[in-house]
Amino acid sequence: MNNQKYTSAIKKTPYNYYIAKKIANLINKGSDRAEVYYECFNNNLIGIDSIERRREVTNVIYDRVILLDKYLLEQFLDGDIVTSKFILVYATAKNDPLFFEFLFEVYREALLNEKQYISLDDFDTFFIGKKESNAKVNKWGEYTIDQLGKGYRNILVESGLGVRAKRNIRVHKILIHPDVVKHLKLIKDDVYLKAILGV
């Protein structure tokens, strides 16, 4: 049995690119978690009316962005849009093992084979496999799995990694800044390059 500690946070907080940039900007200026929380929650820097939702989004996005080292943080904030959006997918996958496995097992496969798209059946097959191999995922109900699938599709589309084509997601191979590729190899995170870029 797979004992990986999976999370379902993506079902409520999928991508949030512009909110992530606001939080990343605070971190880049030296703000610690408490200061980021104060700006986002108390001062509502992220522009979310619901207090509960504001708290949830702040915590989830912070946990992703804080994983970026100084170089990647700066590239996320100031790099070209394709590379910047890629870096947020990387941070999300680094923070969420289940999403990483989806990228590596399903998205990468679609990039590398002739099909070039991910169907609803592909999403179902992925989650069924995880339910069979992981006790935590096995406890998740149909609603959670359905919302996770929607969250994954949202990330692919908003990041530019995929395009909606009727009920499928047509995968889109992207090119990011070569210096970011070199950096990820240098810090031994090239597995994320394989998962997201299909290299």
Image: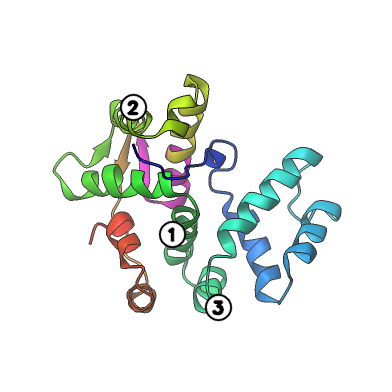
Disc 1 element: helix
| Mark 1 residue type | Tyr
In the image shown, does 138 or 189 lie closer to the viewer? 138
Q: Is residue 151 magenta?
A: no
What residue is rendered at 35% in x and 60% in y? Answer: 192
Can you identify the residue that label 2 sits on?
128
| Mark 3 residue type | Lys
Can you identify the residue that label 3 sits on?
70
The tag earlier along the polypeptide, 1 or 2, is 1
Horizontally, residue 147 falls left or right of residue 184, namely right
The tag earlier along the polypeptide, 2 or 3, is 3
Crowd around label 1: few <14 · some 14–19 · many ≥20 (10 Å): many
What residue is rendered at 24% in x and 57% in y? Answer: 198
What residue is rendered at 49% in x and 37% in y? Answer: 151
The tag earlier along the polypeptide, 3 or 1, is 3
Camera-side mark, 1 or 2? 2
Q: Is residue 29 above or below residue 86?
A: below
Residue at mark 2 to residue at mark 3: CA–CA distance: 38 Å
The numbered disc on residue 90 is 1
Indicate the position of residue 172 as horizontal and vertical percent values.
Answer: 30, 50
What residue is rendered at 36% in x and 31% in y? Answer: 127
What's the magenta region? 153-164
Indicate the position of residue 121 as horizontal and vertical percent values.
Answer: 29, 26
Q: Is residue 162 magenta?
A: yes
In the image shown, does 161 or 7 lie closer to the viewer? 7
Indicate the position of residue 75 as horizontal and vertical percent values.
Answer: 50, 73
CB atoms of marks 2 and 3 within 8 Å: no
Camera-side mark, 2 or 3? 2
